[in-house]
Amino acid sequence: MSKSQITFSLIYFLAVVACIQLAFDYKGAIDTTWTFVLVLLTLPCSLISIIFAWSLIHGAGLEFFTYMYLLFAGINVVWVNTIINYSRKSKKADADRNDLSDA
């Protein structure tokens, strides 16, 4: 992984943590705007939270949702970095093939 990938992954994960802190007060209430931002940040994994929408809206199990969104953020970091690394490898392989065919 490149330095920029690590930096952006860390910034993304910290943004998710910040949104969790802004969205949940752990006393049974949520800030709807920040919760929506949190769901958007953790897409596509957070689509599963539609199933739990009633609980989330009513502030039930916010600790569970905290762990769930942190897990989703981790999965997104792994997916994005895997796609970037795969893309770099295929571009490098194509460049190597072109170099061999030119010789």
Image (cartoon, rainbow, N blue to C red):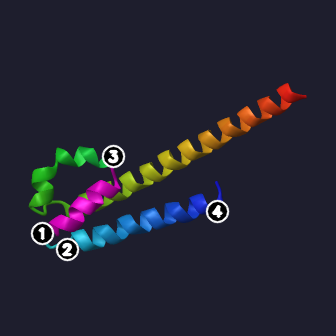
Residue linked to disc 2: 25
Query: Which range is magenta?
Result: 29-44
- If you read the primary sequence from the N terminus, does the residue marked by circle 3 or circle 1 appear first? 1
59 above or below 98? Answer: below
Q: Residues within 10 Å of mark 2 (few under 14, many from 20)?
A: few
- If you read the primary sequence from the N terminus, does the residue marked by circle 4 or circle 1 appear first? 4
* Residue in the picture at 18% in, 46% down: 50
Per the image, is 41 magenta? yes
Furthest toward the top, the residue is: 101
Choose between 8 and 94: the one closer to the eye: 94
Identify the image quadrant of the N terminus: bottom right
Name which residue type carries label 3: Cys
Furthest toward the right, the residue is: 103
Element on which disc 1 rests: loop
Query: Residues under labels 4 and 2: Cα distance?
Result: 34 Å
Name which residue type carries label 1: Gly
Residue linked to disc 3: 45
Residue linked to disc 4: 3
Q: Which mark is residue 47?
A: none
Name which residue type carries label 2: Asp
For marks 4 and 2, give the one nearer the viewer.
4
Query: Residues under labels 4 and 1: Cα distance?
Result: 39 Å
Where is residue 68 drawn, in percent x and y?
31, 54
In the figure, is residue 54 to the left or right of 19?
Answer: left
Identify the image quadrant of the C terminus: top right
Per the image, is 6 magenta? no
In the figure, is residue 9 to the left or right of 95?
Answer: left
